Image: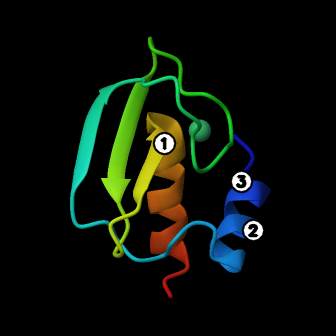
Amino acid sequence: MDIDRLQQKLRTGTLPRARAPRTWVGPGSARVCMACDRVIARDDIEVECDDLTGRPLRFHQSCFDMWEAERAADPA
Ligand SMILES: [Zn+2]
């Protein structure tokens, strides 16, 4: 995972800064991670949450952790 890409997505609004109200953790759904743009394999852990408009966001566990850390380090 590329931290520069994640920071750029936060700057451009591709990834929201607002904390998601609910999150789910489960097996990968073979869909694309919002942070790193790679497929979340079925044997990976996937974290899913909604942004404040209800849009679903999906991440690898490690990408979600990095998103959380970045938002905490540089709050809106
Ligand atoms: Zn990812």
Q: Is residue 75 above or below residue 38?
A: below
44 sits to left or right of 25: right
Q: Position of residue 40 (x, y in %)?
A: 54, 27
- Judged from the image, the secondary structure of the residue bearing numbered disc 3 is helix
Q: Position of residue 46 (x, y in %)?
A: 40, 32
Instruction: Say which residue appears at 68% left-offset and 58% top-offset.
Output: 6
Q: Which mark is residue 3?
A: 3
- Judged from the image, the secondary structure of the residue bearing numbered disc 2 is helix
The residue positioned farthest toward the bottom in the image shown: 76
Q: Is residue 26 above or below residue 70?
A: above
Instruction: Say which residue appears at 49% left-offset and 83% top-offset.
Output: 75
User: Mark 1 or mark 3, which is nearer the start of the sequence?
Assistant: 3
Q: Is residue 17 above or below residue 38?
A: below
Q: Which mark is residue 59?
A: 1
Q: Is residue 50 above or below residue 74?
A: above
For the residues labelled 2 and 1, say whether their Cβ atoms are less than 8 Å apart: no
For the residues labelled 3 and 2, say whether their Cβ atoms are less than 8 Å apart: no
Q: Which mark is residue 46?
A: none
Q: Position of residue 52 (x, y in %)?
A: 34, 75
Mark 1 crowdedness (10 Å alpha carbons): few <14, some 14-19, many ≥20: many
Instruction: Identify the amino acid type marked 2.
Output: Gln
Instruction: Identify the amino acid type marked 3.
Output: Ile
Instruction: Identify the amino acid type marked 1.
Output: Phe
Instruction: Say which residue appears at 71% left-offset and 77% top-offset.
Output: 12
Question: Under 8 Å from ligand 1: the CB of mark 1?
Answer: yes
User: Mark 2 or mark 3, which is nearer the start of the sequence?
Assistant: 3
